[in-house]
Amino acid sequence: MKFDPDCKSPHTCGDCENKCINDVAFLCGLPADSQNEILSRALHKTLRRGEYVFREGQRVDSIVIIKRGRVKLNTCDADGRENIIGIFSDNDTIWEGIFAENRHYPYSAVCLEKTHLCYIKRGDVEDAVSNTTVALKVINLLSNKLHDANERNMILSISEPMKRIAAFLIYNEKRSEEPTLTLRLDDIAGSVGLRPETVSRYIRKMIGEGLIEKVGQSGFRIPDFDRLNAVVGE
């Protein structure tokens, strides 16, 4: 999808083929007039690497669509160590908590690179959910989100570091539409609750055994999904 970071139109992101609404799974089925009404009030932003999309404790007031770029959700423990909740990329949507009353973000969202964003206001989303079709989609997506959270918790429960890292790479492979996973060692470490040096050691071991391949500065490819999956199940 083509995206114009200098877009000024509230209806269509520059020369983009689709409207922002099409990237929000539970809103894309709305009638055209309802879509246009919502998009007329949408806000577009371009943020640089290291800038915050929102901070922990900030009130949830919008759905955030990542049009292009990468964003990590993180918290810091009492010792200042980063814990990564998740990493989101092109066309992913951050909308958890949008329906809860007086909900505040339990984590911060930080751009990992230059990122183009679209914000759809909470009030517009609440109005849309009065549509029965949209409400059913929300229920389905919430079920998928719960399954995803359970899968991440299962990964963190794996005691052996190599198996935990392998399970995390498989988890990201399933979610990615790209042939290469782009993950910095620090991001992997923060996601699986291990020290960066521990992650580095086991990543080198997996590369040496041909379980994964290094691509560029921070990319990985899984040449044999079943073989890596077998490592987790051992």
Image (cartoon, helix red, strand yellow):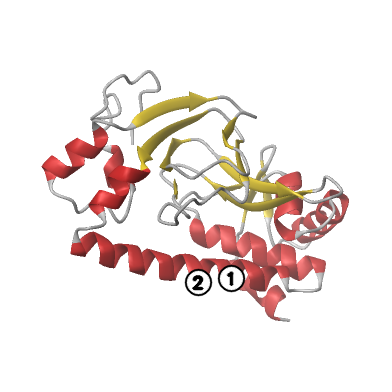
Could you tell me if residue 17 is visible in this image? no
Across and down, in percent, residue 194 comes to 81, 58
What residue does disc 2 label? 147
Point 57% across, 58% down: residue? 172
The image quadrant where one finds the N terminus is: top left
Q: Is residue 131 visible?
A: yes
- Contact, CB < 8 Å: mark 1 with mark 2? yes
Tell whether 226 sits left or right of 63: right
Q: Quadrant of the C terminus?
A: bottom right
Residue furthest out toward the front:
102
Q: Is residue 231 above or below residue 111?
A: below
Residue hosting label 1:
151
Q: Residue at x 73, y 73 (%)?
A: 157
> How far apart are labels 1 and 2 at the CA level?
6 Å
Q: Position of residue 217 (x, y in %)?
A: 70, 37
Q: On screen, 229 above or below 74?
A: below
Q: Is 161 placed above or below 97 here?
A: below
